């Protein structure tokens, strides 16, 4: 375990907010985490503990006067069972390194989740998703350590209460468990998931075609799409989608459709649809607009960006302005997907 004090979080949040943590502890094994928990209980019994991943989904509103924990647990073990490939992956592994490694080893199922920033543990907490796939489709088990007691606890996928960008680790058990390993069931047989028109279009344009495309082709197409739409945090601080797409009753959608016949939607279930928040924000005139040192991205209105030296409060002010305009225009409350630390409860 390594502890740093008054530690800058600049390289631990992709928004590029200059905040610091009173204590920042990194560990690299389950036993090391258990020692860290015992140490925190005895040395800082009254401090808040926050476990972070790659910091790609975090907004710090101020310096963090508690203890931040970060996993450096790495490594992948592989077990084959017929065409099933079972992986057990350390929570501190960079997500996209895992995807690239799987594609090059012909382990299929993660390719649509290419180029998503962050680490494996956070992917399981957040149920990351893109281009018709979600982490929950391939997660079978999540190993954790109880941050109160240091005890081990494993959650089978059906105990994780997975839903759109949600899990039990974000809701009822928020902050209680640190993910140490995630288990995935992948396949040695490649079945392309091409439900997104844009993915099909890029595959056609690059000559890969739809019938014979490989997982590497799909990965390349998705990286191209993401690069063309989403700002690179190295160039402009951001946390990907800032808001979740709201799930609304069909009647709400129909009402909007009367005014805007082109409103896009994804069917959620028999009664509800998901409306892209980016579309709602764009209709409110926010796409590409700034408020102080924060802005709504000009190619994807779901993304808020740091124009340079923005504070967490600058981003929050923009978040609130956008939310209230969307509510005024459409009567829909959009919720942040990003974890706002020291701010609004989620
Ligand atoms: N749209 C607009 N204006 C915009 C942005 C989007 O009109 O500024 C419309 C598009 O024209 C399209 C629809 O909204 O009809 C959906 O857009 P897109 O395919 O870009 O996806 P999204 O719903 O905005 C979600 C995820 C992304 C993920 C993409 C692709 C959430 C919160 N976001 O965005 O995830 O990459 O789908 O599957 O669900 C992330 O979580 O950080 C992230 C980038």
Image (cartoon, rainbow, N blue to C red):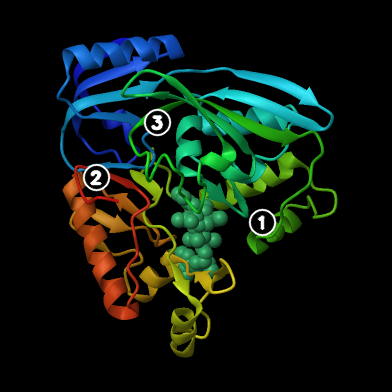
Q: Are marks 3 and 1 in contact (CB under 8 Å)?
A: no
Is the residue 272 above or below the residue 120 in the image? Answer: below
Crowding at mark 1 (Cα within 10 Å: few <14, some 14-19, many 20+): many
Q: Provide residue 159's location: percent of width, then percent of height.
A: 53, 40
Q: Residues within 10 Å of mark 3 (few under 14, many from 20)?
A: many
Give the structural element (helix, strand or loop) at label 3.
loop
Residue 215 drawn at (x, y percent): 74, 41
Residue wearing tag 1: 199
| Mark earlier in primary sequence (3, 2) | 3
- Distance, label 2 to label 1, CA atoms, is 32 Å
Q: Position of residue 42 (x, y in %)?
A: 19, 12
The tag on residue 308 is 2
Tell me which residue sits at (37%, 44%) in the image.
Answer: 172
Q: Which residue is mark 3?
A: 53
As rendered, which of 313 and 266 lies closer to the eye?
266
On the image, which quarter does residue 304 sit in? Answer: bottom left
Report the mark closest to the observer, 2 or 1.
1
User: Would residue 194 appear left or right of 328 to someone viewing this image?
Assistant: right
The Cα–Cα distance between marks 3 and 2, rounded to whole angstroms, is 23 Å
Mark 2: secondary structure: loop
Picture quarter with the N terminus: top left
Q: Nearer the viewer, mark 3 or mark 1?
A: 3
**Residue 85 on image: x %, y %:** 74, 29
Mark 2 or mark 1: name the one nearer the start of the chain. 1
Q: Is residue 262 left or right of residue 216?
A: left
Local crowd size for mark 2, using a 10 Å CA cut-off: few (<14), some (14–19), many (≥20) = some
Along the viewing direction, whichever of 40 and 201 lies nearer the viewer: 40
| Disc 3 C-beta below 8 A from ligand 1 | no
Q: Is residue 162 left or right of residue 28?
A: right
| Up/down of 75 relative to 182, above or below | above
Q: What's the mark number on residue 287?
A: none
Query: Residue at the location (32% across, 51% down)?
Result: 305
């Amino acid at each position: 375990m390594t502890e740093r004090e008054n530690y800058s979080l600049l390289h631990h949040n992709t928004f590029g907010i200059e905040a610091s943590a009173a204590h920042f502890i990194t560990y690299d094994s389950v036993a090391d985490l258990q020692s860290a928990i015992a140490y925190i209980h005895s040395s800082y019994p009254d401090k808040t503990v926050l476990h972070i991943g790659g910091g790609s989904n975090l907004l710090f509103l101020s310096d963090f006067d508690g203890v931040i924990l970060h996993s450096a647990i790495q490594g992948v073990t592989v077990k084959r069972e017929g065409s099933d490939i079972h992986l057990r992956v350390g929570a501190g592994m960079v997500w996209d390194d895992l995807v690239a490694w799987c594609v090059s080893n012909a382990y299929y199922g993660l390719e649509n989740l290419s180029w998503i920033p962050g680490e494996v543990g956070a992917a399981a907490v957040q149920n990351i998703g893109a281009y018709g796939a979600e982490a929950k489709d391939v997660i079978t088990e999540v190993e954790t350590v109880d941050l109160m007691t240091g005890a081990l606890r494993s959650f089978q996928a059906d105990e994780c209460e997975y839903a759109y960008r949600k899990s039990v680790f974000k809701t009822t058990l928020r902050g209680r468990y640190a993910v140490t390993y995630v288990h995935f069931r992948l396949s040695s047989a490649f079945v392309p998931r091409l439900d997104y028109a844009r993915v099909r279009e890029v595959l056609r344009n690059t000559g890969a075609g739809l019938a014979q495309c490989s997982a590497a082709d799909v990965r390349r197409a998705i990286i191209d799409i993401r690069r063309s739409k989403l700002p690179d945090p190295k160039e402009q601080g951001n946390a990907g989608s800032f808001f979740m797409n709201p799930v609304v009753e069909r009647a709400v959608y129909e009402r909007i459709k009367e005014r805007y016949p082109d409103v896009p939607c994804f069917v959620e279930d028999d009664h509800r649809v998901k409306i892209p928040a980016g579309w709602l924000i764009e209709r409110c005139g926010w796409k590409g607009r700034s408020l102080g040192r924060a802005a709504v991205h000009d190619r994807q209105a779901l993304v808020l960006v740091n124009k340079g030296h923005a504070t967490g409060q600058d981003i929050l002010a923009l978040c609130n302005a956008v939310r209230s305009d969307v509510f005024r225009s459409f009567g829909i409350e959009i919720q942040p997907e990003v974890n706002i630390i020291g701010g609004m409860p989620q």
